[in-house]
Image: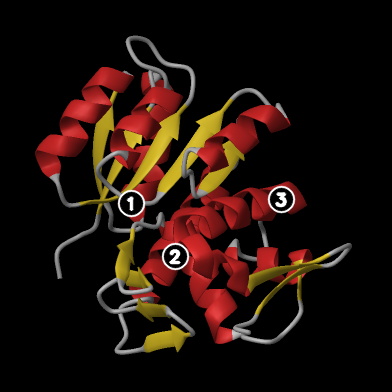
């Protein structure tokens, strides 16, 4: 099996080297970009990149714009790095389709663990399982979702969240349980992360978005009436 390719984007060469060294030890192939424009060029020229680690503050094109460019064409998992611990930045990242969000300074070992967790879950989606609920079907192997017969374009994390909801139909799920299951136990976020993703998921599912019920003060329940 070929090594998985990871694109590391940061204008600090020291940071890129640090992250690359840890990823190479785990048998990943690492591509580097020193600014946003170069990152976009490399991403679309390479095609088979499995994951992107993306800094926010960069010359030529910042991380937000890079994320928008990539999300316009791909649902590849994106981990965003930032020196700012502003929750508004974090929420913006999730609105744009970022899958994980890590503030600098960070432990390279933790970053690599997040990378491996995302790729494990992504690989785990490649099963024969097709989930159906009402007018929604979700094919894990093909990574395809249809609502009322129409294809629905979901980000990696939105797909994972919908899978979790459909696998737990009729069960009241707390935000903490959703975070632990979908974002992994070591995610240090808050409920607004889930609420943001649920809002986008409902919107993309159209009328079928009503299957996701809000349980005030607790979380959500996926239920077909």
Q: From this viewpoint, which residue is outermost toward the top?
A: 60
Residue 190 can be seen in this image:
no
Up the image or down, 34 lies above or below 31; here it is above
Tag 2–tag 1 contact (CB < 8 Å): yes
Q: Position of residue 56 (x, y in %)?
A: 48, 24
Expressed as whole percent of the image width and height from the top left, the position of residue 30 reads 26, 43
Residue contact at pointers 3 and 1, CB within 8 angstroms: no
Q: Is residue 107 above or below residue 208?
A: above
The quarter of the displayed image where residue 167 is located: bottom right
Question: Residue shown at 45%/26% (left/top)?
Answer: 64
Residue at 28% in and 79% down: 141
Give the answer, above or below, for where 124 lies relative to 184: below
The residue lying furthest to the right in this view is 217
Residue 158 seen from this side: yes
Q: Which mark is residue 75?
A: 1
Q: Which residue is pictured at 63% across the width and 84% down the height?
A: 225
Residue to which mark 3 is pinned = 188
Secondary structure, mark 2, is helix
* Mark-to-mark CA distance, 2 and 1: 10 Å
Question: 133 or 30, which lies in front?
Answer: 133
Which quarter of the figure has residue 14?
Answer: top left
Residue 92 x/y as whole percent: 58, 33
Q: Answer with mark 2 or mark 3, whichever residue precedes in sequence.
A: 2
Residue at mark 2 = 159
Mark 3, Cα crowd under 10 Å, few <14 / some 14-19 / many 20+, is few
């Amino acid at each position: 099996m070929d090594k998985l390719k990871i694109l590391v984007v940061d204008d600090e060469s020291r940071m890129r080297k640090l992250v690359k060294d840890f990823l190479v030890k785990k048998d990943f192939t690492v591509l580097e970009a020193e600014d946003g424009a170069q990152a976009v060029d490399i991403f679309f020229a390479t095609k088979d990149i499995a994951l992107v680690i993306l800094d926010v503050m960069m010359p030529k094109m910042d991380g937000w714009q890079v994320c928008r460019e990539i999300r316009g064409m791909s649902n590849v998992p994106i981990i965003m790095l930032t020196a700012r611990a502003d929750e508004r930045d974090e929420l913006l990242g999730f609105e744009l389709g970022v899958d994980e969000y890590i503030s600098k300074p960070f432990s390279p070992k933790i970053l690599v663990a997040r990378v491996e967790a995302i790729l494990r879950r992504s690989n785990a989606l490649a099963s024969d399982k097709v989930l159906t609920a009402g007018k929604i079907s979700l094919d894990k192997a093909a990574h395809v979702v249809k609502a009322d017969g129409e294809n629905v374009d979901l980000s990696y994390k939105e797909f994972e969240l919908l899978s979790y909801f459909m696998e737990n139909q009729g069960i009241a799920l707390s935000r903490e349980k959703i975070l632990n299951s979908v974002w992994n136990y070591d995610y240090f976020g808050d409920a607004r992360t889930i609420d943001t993703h649920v809002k986008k998921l409902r919107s993309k599912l159209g009328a079928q978005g009503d299957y996701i019920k809000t349980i005030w003060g607790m979380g959500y329940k996926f239920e077909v009436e």
